[in-house]
Image (cartoon, rainbow, N blue to C red):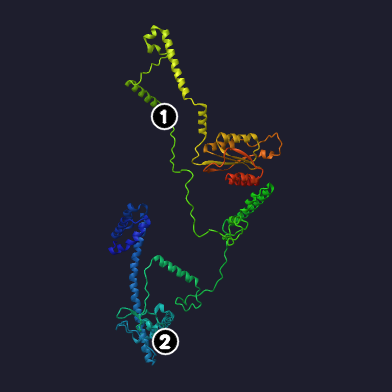
Amino acid sequence: MSLPKREVEELRPWVERTVKKVLGFSEPTVVTAALHCVGKGLDKRKTTDQLRPFLDDSAGGFVERLFEALEESRNSRGNKGAGEKNRKRELKIKQMMEAATKQIEERKKQLSFTPSVCVFSSNHDLGGGSSIAPSQAASFMNDAIEKARKAAELQARIQSQLAMKPGILGTLGNTGPQNFVALANLHAMGIAPPKVEIKEVNKPTPLILDDKGRTVDASGKEVELTHRMPTLKANIRAVKREQFRQQLKEKPGEDLESTSYFDLRVPMGPAQRTRRSFRFHDPGRFEKIAQRVRTKAQLERLQNEIAQAAKKTGIQASTKLALIAPKKEIEEGEVPSIEWWDSFILPSNIFEEFDLFGVTNLVEHPAQMSPPVDTDKPVTLGVYLTKKEQKKLRRQTRREGQKEVQEKVRLGLMPPPEPKVRISNLMRVLGTEAVQDPTKVESFVRDRMFKRQKIHEEANAARKLTAEQRKEKKVKKLKEDLTDGVHIAVYRIRYLQNPAKKFKVEANANQLYLTGTVVLHKDVNLVVVEGGPKSQKKFKKLMLHRIKWEEHNSKRDDGDDDAKRNNKCWLIWEGTAKERSFGEMKFKQCPTENMAREHFRKHGTEHYWDLALSHSVLDGTDD
């Protein structure tokens, strides 16, 4: 059966939602086709055949849903008709109740019973044809009285509860016609109406303007109204959020019934004790505590070992290494009064007692200095040719030289070169002359060959460098350009008393044109070399790889066998400086620590000695 157009349009929103749920997106073509099938009144099978090209396998399920929705729509329209019948039936019952009430009133008048107040609503037109005969009134009078009494009691109870809440239905002064009927029934049955307190409804203050347009109150006094300025939504939300937080912080008042939000109908539950829950520690918390304890114990053990090593060796400066760590344990989040690195410098551990001369709240910017090397100098890479390219370039150079000689000969600027006669080609070059006198021709050719060889040897001898020139060339090759900075390396050797190893260090440093010094001290033999990067690379390979510092078989028993067997060389520092600090490589024997430090202080490099000394102390504690 076909559907009217209005009902088809009512189904359109549901069909669109269903299509979007099945396909995942909205498709107007499928919606139009489905509504067309429903409007034509097709059955399920034909509708499925029509929609199968659009929905494939899901067409059957979609048609089932569509016809179920159509059936529900028809049932809802049928329910609307049933609702109209129910309303007519209720109206008829109401008319019968009013007629029964009239009969009760007439019967009471006949029995001389006059109610104190009789209020009746005449808003409904009962019609003239609804009168009931006296014989019928006697039969259902008792039932009507009982029903009216129960209905009146129920309405009175509901009205008494709602009257306490003025915000729900208003006060008794705003009571409608149905409430008047309930009160009339209560009076008729002899039940006293409930007492309801009439509460005043807060109304807004009326706006009064004078002849000048100003806002005034009832007495004529000017009133200043609150002006609201426009602001950003973000600021409004921030203000509301802050007000809400303030309300949460404030404790609620004890008199809850005085608030307008208190509802008597909602029962208040008794205070219950909250159940205590488990509190689990964060994962890894005790591991961090244990690691902190282990680190602290290891630091204390290291300090003790350093102090013992300083006492044994008699090195006073090494004890300062044990003082650089914090002595007092500081808890997390606590700010110390003085930092541990400042406590070593300041005479007292209080900043207030120390006069900080020249210290202000201003930031001092140091003067900018140009770097020791020219960083803006362009770096050029050398061009390296292959063997094939070198041969090709040589051929081109020789060809150009030969062309130049040929042009000079052609112009008469130089005589033509003599033919290059050899024993193998004399017949081809001389021709008939070689046949006439072969002996003469042979001696002539050999003379020419000897002359050419002599000229070649003289040219080679002229190009050959002298002994001084060869030496200068070798020195120039070994010496490097140090305008960009001097490369420095500092080595520490545990035992350096072997003359052969001392000779290797000194000889290689002189051959590589390195400058520096060698300080001999017990367990702190320091070698400082200065030079170019290539020389440093060769000397580093010598110190760390080529020289075998261990001496396993020593013929002399001088008490240093342990040091010889465990002898080793360390590279403790390497870097660059602007210029050299030492001259030619020399050895310096320093029996005491102060003497060695004084030697380096003269050259402005005492930090080399401090670094090597701390390295030796730590190395001794590790052993």
Up-down relation of residue 196 to residue 311 (above or below): below
Does residue 622 appear in the picture of this structure?
A: no
Of 407 and 19, nearer the camera is: 407
Examine the image and state in which quarter residue 409 appears.
Answer: top left
* Residue placed furthest toward the bottom: 112
Note whether 551 is above or below 448 in the view shown: below
Which comes before the other along the chain, label 1 or label 2? 2
Which one is nearer the viewer's eye here, 119 or 526? 526
Q: Which residue is mark 1?
A: 389
Where is residue 154, by image quadrant?
A: bottom left
- Residue 408's place in the image compared with 238, above or below, is above
Determine which residue is flagged by label 2. Answer: 189
Q: Secondary structure at mark 1?
A: helix
Identify which residue is drawn at 71% across, 36% down. Answer: 557
Residue 225: % across, % down: 37, 76
The reply to whether residue 18 is in sight is yes
- Residue 597 horizontal/vertical position (percent): 62, 46
Query: Residue 543: x percent and y percent?
Result: 59, 37
Residue at 62 percent across and 38 percent down: it is 587
The CA distance from mark 1 to mark 2 is: 132 Å
Seen at 39% across and 66% down, the residue is 233
What is the x, y in percent for residue 404?
35, 24
The answer to whether 74 appears left or right of 238 in the picture is left
Q: Amino acid at mark 2?
A: Met
Classify the position of the C terminus by image quarter.
top right
Q: Tag on residue 586?
A: none
Which residue is found at the position 51% from the left and 77% from the top?
A: 254
Q: Quadrant of the N terminus?
A: bottom left
Question: Foreground residue, 203 or 291?
Answer: 291
Q: Secondary structure at mark 2?
A: helix
Judge by depth and name the residue closer to the eye, 594 or 533. Answer: 594
Q: Looking at numbered disc 1 in the image, what kind of residue is underneath it?
A: Glu
